């Protein structure tokens, strides 16, 4: 295979891997999946191809902090929700607010070419888990309250207290 054909194949495989998921994966995840098809590919090659694909407008890179980039196989603007508890990134089925761009242009005199909008908080799964954990904790506390250990440690401490006066 020629060098050019090999790099096209690498790029297409990476794109196919990324478009096969809605999880907005990290480069490490994409690397692991791509190795199933191209076992000798390196992480550096995956990064290089992700950059090329981004510059070509085929994918989006979402940045969540200096070391955490996530990739999206859908390059058309859409909004995301980032869970601060489990780190998952969800697509939001919201229409893109082009009115916002007009507002910014009117307000600032700048020419707006696009915008990004990110929401963050706790996802529905993490909320449900927290609620469940809270309920378990509450029922455990209730049980402790209803079933005291036999004998009252306070009374026995009182009974055995040595008499200080003679
Ligand atoms: Zn979560
Ligand atoms: Zn997305």
Image (cartoon, rainbow, N blue to C red):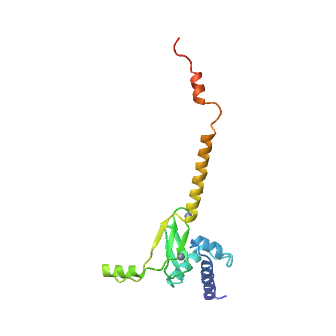
Position of residue 82 measured from the top left corner of the image (x, y, whole percent): 51, 68
In this picture, residue 119 sits left or right of residue 39: left
Quadrant of res 72: bottom right
Q: Name the residue furthest top.
A: 166
Quarter of image, ligand 1? bottom right
Position of residue 65 measured from the top left corner of the image (x, y, whole percent): 48, 67
**Foreground residue among 106 and 43:** 106
Residue 85 against residue 80 in the figure, above or below: above
Residue 78 against residue 146 in the figure, above or below: below
Q: Residue at x 59, y 54 (%)?
A: 133
Position of residue 124 measured from the top left corner of the image (x, y, whole percent): 55, 65
Residue 125 against residue 40 in the figure, above or below: above
In this picture, residue 66 sits left or right of residue 40: left
Name the image quarter holding the N terminus: bottom right
Q: Residue at x 59, y 22 (%)?
A: 159
**Foreground residue among 80 and 6:** 80
Position of residue 131 measured from the top left corner of the image (x, y, whole percent): 57, 57
In this picture, residue 27 sits left or right of residue 36: left
């Amino acid at each position: 295979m020629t060098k050019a054909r090999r790099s096209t194949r690498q790029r297409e495989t990476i794109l196919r891997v990324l478009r096969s998921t809605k999880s907005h994966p990290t480069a490490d995840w994409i690397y692991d999946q791509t190795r199933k098809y191209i076992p000798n590919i390196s992480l550096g090659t995956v990064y290089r191809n992700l950059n090329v694909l981004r510059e070509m407008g085929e994918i989006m890179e979402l940045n969540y902090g200096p070391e955490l980039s996530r990739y999206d196989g859908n390059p058309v603007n859409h909004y995301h929700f980032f869970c601060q508890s489990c780190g998952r990134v969800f697509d939001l089925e919201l229409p893109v607010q082009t009115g916002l761009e007009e507002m910014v242009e009117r307000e600032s005199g700048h020419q707006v070419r696009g915008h990004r909008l990110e929401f963050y908080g706790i996802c529905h799964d993490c909320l449900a888990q927290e609620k469940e954990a809270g309920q378990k904790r509450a029922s455990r506390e209730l049980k402790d309250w209803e079933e005291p250990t036999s004998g009252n440690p306070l009374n026995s401490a009182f009974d055995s207290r040595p008499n200080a006066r003679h």
